């Protein structure tokens, strides 16, 4: 009988050992391409000014890039009504103006200035004159525009693809609207015999942003760890990877030509970036934190990871963010369904 109890005790102890080891392993295991962060209460700190602000009427905020104000957008699919409504807010998130746009449905608005709106539709590139309320196509063989930011009055930095002789070049280009749509290469990422615009539009899907002092431009990828840096004139000078090192996503193209992300081979990475003082601050979705916004700081000297911060707001994390706009002492975060502004105190 004593021998029997000894065996039972031994089995119980072994089982408990397996449970403890399994729990420790699960606790220490991080999702793929997530690194152990050094969280610090560092400057700048963020203090809420306004939260859960709704400017447009639709369910989603749909903030579109602009160099003058914060612009939310509603999309209307009803017949005989403007297809797009733009809601222009000041930096205090007060609505100042609305614009009704008569541009084709299913257009992709890329950038809004005080004079024009640049958009694509059916792979064509258009400029919409806000005063005249008319659109004109900007034609260049093989041109596919995915993202834009303005450098000067008629000069833009773009990510996309162009046809150069018999080859298709994908990457970053200087685009001048007034010089017969002059397109000059800035940073070519790949060259192909056939167009790969839809594939690379997914692989390098991201957005441009300017540093707080307006001296630098950054392009970050939402499903890749790469960040590309340019000076204020659009000249490329550096690219680096965030510490998660999420790879380029794998893209599948169906027989009918539709491209989409491959499951298990696509990892969300960066949803926003701001550059201020000596830091590049990355709003990263590659985190185990579910109820906090994680902001990783990188050095502007050697582009290495320094530390991370947590921003507590309404139980949201970086997956809820669609864009962040930074100013001298303020940031405005666009979430899926609302806007919020925060003071940056140094």
Image (cartoon, helix red, strand yellow):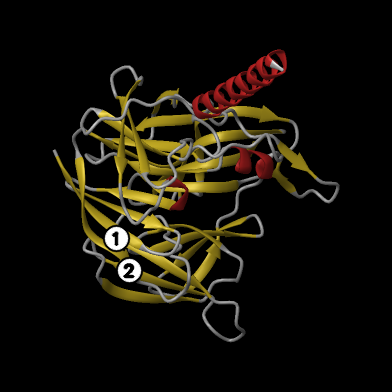
If you read the primary sequence from the N terminus, does the residue marked by circle 2 or circle 1 appear first? Answer: 1
- Image x and y of residue 70, in percent: 32, 61
- Image x and y of residue 238, in percent: 40, 23
Crowding at label 1, few (<14), some or many (≥20) Cα neighbours within 10 Å? some
- Image x and y of residue 297, in percent: 31, 30
Q: Which residue is mark 2?
A: 88
Q: Is residue 250 left or right of residue 38?
A: right
Q: Is residue 217 visible?
A: yes
Label of residue 69 in the image? 1
Proximity of marks 2 and 1: CB atoms separated by less than 8 Å: yes
Quadrant for the N terminus, please.
top right
Q: Is residue 237 left or right of residue 80?
A: left
Most distant residue in the front direction: 1
In the image, 96 versus 43, the foreground residue is 43
Label of residue 32 in the image? none
Q: Residue at x 59, y 28 (%)?
A: 247
In the image, 4 versus 288, the foreground residue is 4
Q: Secondary structure at mark 2?
A: strand
Relative to 23, is 137 above or below? below
Report the Cα–Cα distance between label 2 and label 1: 7 Å
Q: Residue at x 55, y 56 (%)?
A: 138
Q: Is residue 50 left or right of residue 252?
A: left
């Amino acid at each position: 009988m004593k021998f029997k109890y000894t065996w039972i005790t031994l089995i119980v102890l072994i089982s408990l050992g397996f449970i403890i080891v399994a729990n420790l392993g699960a606790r220490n295991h991080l999702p793929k391409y997530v690194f152990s962060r050094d969280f610090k209460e560092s400057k700048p700190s963020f203090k809420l000014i306004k939260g859960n602000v709704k400017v447009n009427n639709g369910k989603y905020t749909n903030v579109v890039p602009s160099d003058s104000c914060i612009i939310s957008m509603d999309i209307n699919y009803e017949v005989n009504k403007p297809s797009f409504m733009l809601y222009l807010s000041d930096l205090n998130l007060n609505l100042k103006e609305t614009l009704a746009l008569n541009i084709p449905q299913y257009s992709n608005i890329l950038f809004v200035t005080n004079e024009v709106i640049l958009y694509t539709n059916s792979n064509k590139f258009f400029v919409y004159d806000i005063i005249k309320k008319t659109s004109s196509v900007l034609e260049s063989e093989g041109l596919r525009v995915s993202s834009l930011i303005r450098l000067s009055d008629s000069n833009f930095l773009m990510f996309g693809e162009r046809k150069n002789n018999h080859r298709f070049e994908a990457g970053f280009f200087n685009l001048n609207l007034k010089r017969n749509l002059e397109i000059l290469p800035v940073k070519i990422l790949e060259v192909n015999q056939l167009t790969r615009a839809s594939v690379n539009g997914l692989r390098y899907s991201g957005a441009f942003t300017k540093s707080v002092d307006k001296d630098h431009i950054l392009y970050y990828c939402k499903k890749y760890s790469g960040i590309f840096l340019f000076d204020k004139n659009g000249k490329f000078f550096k690219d680096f990877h965030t510490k998660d090192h999420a790879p380029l996503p794998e893209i599948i193209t169906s027989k009918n030509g539709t491209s989409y992300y491959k499951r298990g081979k696509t990892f969300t990475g960066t949803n926003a970036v701001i550059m201020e003082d000596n830091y590049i601050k990355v709003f990263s979705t590659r985190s185990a934190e579910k109820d906090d916004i994680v902001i990783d700081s990188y050095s502007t000297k050697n582009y290495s990871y320094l530390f991370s911060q947590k921003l507590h707001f309404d139980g949201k994390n970086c997956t809820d963010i669609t864009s962040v706009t930074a100013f001298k002492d303020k940031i405005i975060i666009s979430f899926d369904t609302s806007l919020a502004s925060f003071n940056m105190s140094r």
